[in-house]
Image (cartoon, grey):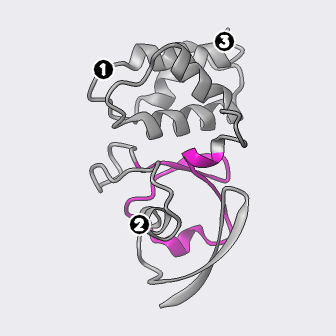
Amino acid sequence: MKTISLQINGKKHQVEVEPEEPLLYILREEFQLSGAKFGCGLQQCAACLVLVDNSAQYTCVRPCENFEGKTIETIEGLRKGDKLHPIQKAFIEVQAAQCGYCLNGMLISAVALLRENPNPTEEEIKASLHKVICRCGTHSRFVKAVKKVSGYR
C-alpha cells in the first residue's frame, strides 16, 4: 500500500492504495464517482475516460500512481453547482443519449476537444468522438450537440 495524492474535480485527496490499481477503481470505489464506467477493460471502448490536464485519458488499466500530480476531472466535475456544463445541456437538448453506455466517453471527449479547439470542423468533431464505441449508433446526435456548443465553422 502507498499513500498517493490525487487532485479530483478541484479537490486534493490523499488515498492509501495499491499503486498499480487502475484509477477507474479508485474513482468509483474510494470517491463514489461512478460516471466513468468499466466497459472493455482494454482501453478500446472509452467508457472509462476522464479529463487529465484537459486531455481525455483512459483509466481502466492505467495505474493510479500515474495520475499523481495531475488535474483529474470526471463527468461529475463538469457540473458547477446546479449549472450543467454547456455540452451536457446540448446533449440533453438534442436527445443525444440513449442507453448511456458511451455517454461518459462522448461527453469527456467533446469537452477535451472544445477546450483544445473551440471552433472544430465537423471532421475534427467526428475524429474526436470516433474512439468512443456507441452501441445505439447515435453519433450524428453527438456531433450535432458538439456543433451546438462550439463556434462550428
Q: Residue furthest top?
A: 153
Q: Residue 137 got which mark?
A: 1
Q: Are circles 1 and 3 on residues that touch, CB within 8 Å?
A: no
Relative image position of residue 151 (x, y in whole percent): 72, 14
Q: Secondary structure at mark 3?
A: loop
Which quadrant would the C terminus be assigned to in this image? top right
Camera-side mark, 1 or 3? 1
Q: Residues within 10 Å of mark 3 (few under 14, many from 20)?
A: some
Write down the residue under mark 3: 152
Q: Secondary structure at mark 1?
A: loop
Relative image position of residue 131 (x, y in whole percent): 40, 36
The number of numbered discs placed on residues in the rendered structure image is 3
Q: Residue furthest bottom?
A: 1
Distance from the alpha carbon under mark 2 to that under mark 1: 28 Å
Q: Residue 25 got which mark?
A: 2
What range is drawn magenta here? Answer: 48-77
Hey, what amino acid is under mark 2?
A: Tyr
Q: Secondary structure at mark 2?
A: helix
Residue for point 41% across, 25% down: 97
Decide which of tag 2 and tag 1 comes sooner along the chain. 2
Q: Would you identify the image quadrant in which residue 119 lies?
A: top right
Relative image position of residue 7 (x, y in whole percent): 68, 65
Residue for point 60% across, 81% down: 4
Q: Residues within 10 Å of mark 2 (few under 14, many from 20)?
A: many
Hey, what amino acid is under mark 3?
A: Tyr
Does residue 31 appear left or right of residue 6 in this picture?
Answer: left
Hey, what amino acid is under mark 1?
A: Gly
- Residue nearest the viewer, comparing 63 with 94: 94
Can residue 153 be seen in the rendering of this structure?
yes
Can residue 123 be seen in the rendering of this structure?
no
